[in-house]
Image: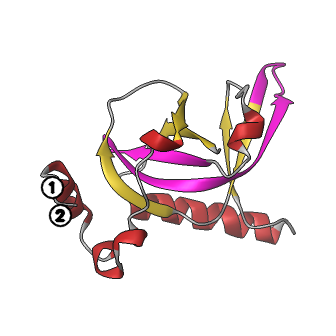
């Protein structure tokens, strides 16, 4: 069974911001002759890598709501130029919108069990994907979405 990570998407104001960032990173990877992916570097290395790479995703918290996810493609430990151990999270190029779910701020990343992860929004129907983000947030708070 897959295990996921959850992390604050610092600097993003919306899912569109995240998509732009991911597109830019994917284009840079393609220009370098690599597979299209985005990359996120974190200080702490997940100990449960096997579970994460068995279909796991990185869930992004944007403005206090779990809003999107990206599939985890690979995880790589490395040492930076200052001799500090770090971790590269290789993420798939697709940003998948999820049902909005409130989440308080936290530092770093956390594990997220599949049973606690919000479901993908697109599975609910194409018309809901086209809704403005604020409307989706309000409907989710009312329990209607």
Determine the secondary structure under disc 1: helix
Q: Is residue 32 left or right of residue 114?
A: right
Q: Position of residue 4 (x, y in %)?
A: 58, 41
Nearer to us in this view, 120 or 58 = 120
Residue at (53, 63) in percent of width and height: 95
Label 1 sits on residue: 138
Dominant SS of magenta comes to strand
Q: Answer yes or no: is residue 9 visible.
A: no
Q: Are marks 2 and 1 in contact (CB under 8 Å)?
A: yes
Question: What residue occupies the far top of the structure in this picture?
Answer: 83
Whole-angstrom CA distance, mark 2 to mark 1, is 5 Å
Image quadrant where residue 34 sits = bottom right
Image quadrant where residue 31 sits = bottom right
Q: Position of residue 22 (x, y in %)?
A: 58, 61
The C terminus, quarter of image: bottom left
Range of magenta residues: 57-86
Q: Position of residue 135 (x, y in %)?
A: 17, 63
Q: Is residue 135 left or right of residue 85?
A: left
Reply above or below: 28 against 69.
below
Label 2 sits on residue: 135
Q: Answer yes or no: is residue 136 visible.
A: yes
Question: What residue occupies the far left of the structure in this picture?
Answer: 142
Q: Residues within 10 Å of mark 1 (few under 14, many from 20)?
A: few
């Amino acid at each position: 069974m897959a295990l996921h990570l959850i992390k604050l998407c610092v600097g993003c104001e919306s899912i569109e911001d995240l998509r732009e960032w991911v597109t830019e990173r994917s284009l840079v990877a393609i220009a370098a002759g690599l597979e299209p992916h985005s990359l996120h570097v974190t200080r702490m290395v997940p100990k449960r890598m096997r579970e994460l790479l068995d279909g796991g995703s990185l869930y992004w918290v944007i403005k206090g709501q779990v809003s999107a996810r990206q599939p985890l493609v690979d995880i790589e430990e490395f040492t930076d130029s200052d001799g500090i151990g770090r971790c590269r999270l290789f993420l798939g190029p697709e940003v998948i919108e999820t049902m909005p779910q409130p989440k308080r701020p936290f530092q770093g990343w956390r594990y997220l069990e599949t049973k606690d992860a919000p479901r993908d929004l697109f599975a609910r129907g194409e018309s809901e994907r086209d809704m403005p983000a604020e409307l989706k947030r309000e409907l989710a708070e009312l329990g209607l979405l």
